[in-house]
Image: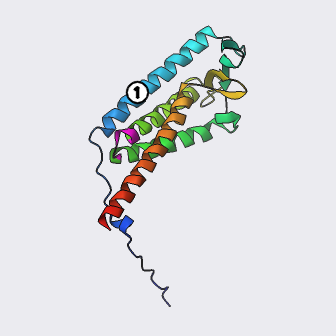
Amino acid sequence: MQAPRRVRTLTAADTTPAPPPHPLAVPVAALIAAAGIVLDQATKLVALRLLEPGRFVPLLGDGVGWQLVENPGAAFGLRAPTWVFLVVAVLVVTIVVRSLPHAPTLLQASAYGLLLSGAIGNMFDRVLRAQDGFLSGKVVDFVAWGNFPRFNAADSWITIGFALLVIALLLEDRRASRAEQASA
């Protein structure tokens, strides 16, 4: 006996065409990603040269400053083997690279560029800063903000990129809703 076939009904949202990709999406994202990676790695080199591991250097009072920490984990001190974080980074990079050519706005392309630079910047640390064997590298964190876990430029790029991507997708959803209402 055959299973009953499901019939999918089309809604107006299904018929709203996707916006075309922005012609500058890939070059803009690539430029942002390259600049972000260079800035991330440069700030980490400066931190490694100028800061003493673990010592807090105040910048804005006692709560904001610099503190060099080599982080074997991930955001918020999550612990797992380095290869897990590398797999996650490779997945993020793969998803972003596949999505980027379809980005309809420069805001979305910029978000993708920031996500790429953050993921690749921290991936470089894990691979290139390995001292205890292959893939044993630790991420260099140096920005201290109160009791918040220490972070770096790449972490900031990921956070800002994710926030921009959410905003871009919400704006795109709003555009699609308006187009749906206009066609109804």
Type of residue at label 1?
Ala
Q: Residue at x 39, y 59 (%)?
A: 177
Crowd band around label 1 with a 10 angstrom C-alpha radius: few (<14), some (14–19), many (20+): some
Number of numbered discs on residues: 1
Instruction: State the colouring used for the structure image.
Output: rainbow
Assess whether residue 106 is covered by the magenta stretch: yes
Q: Most extreme residue toward the bottom, as rendered? A: 1
Q: Most extreme residue toward the left, as rendered? A: 23
2 is higher (above) or lower (below) than 59? below
Residue matched to label 1: 34
Give the residues drawn in magenta, as a range: 103-108
What is the x, y in percent for residue 75?
Answer: 64, 35
Position of 163 with respect to 30 (left or right) is right
Quadrant hosting residue 130:
top right
Q: Residue at x 43, y 39 (%)?
A: 112
Q: Please indicate, yes or no, whether residue 74 appears anywhere in the rendered image.
A: no
Check disc 1 and report its element: helix, strand or loop. Answer: helix
In front here: 177 or 135? 177
What is the x, y in percent for residue 106?
Answer: 35, 39
Position of 80 with respect to 158 (left or right) is right
Q: Most extreme residue toward the top, as rendered? A: 50
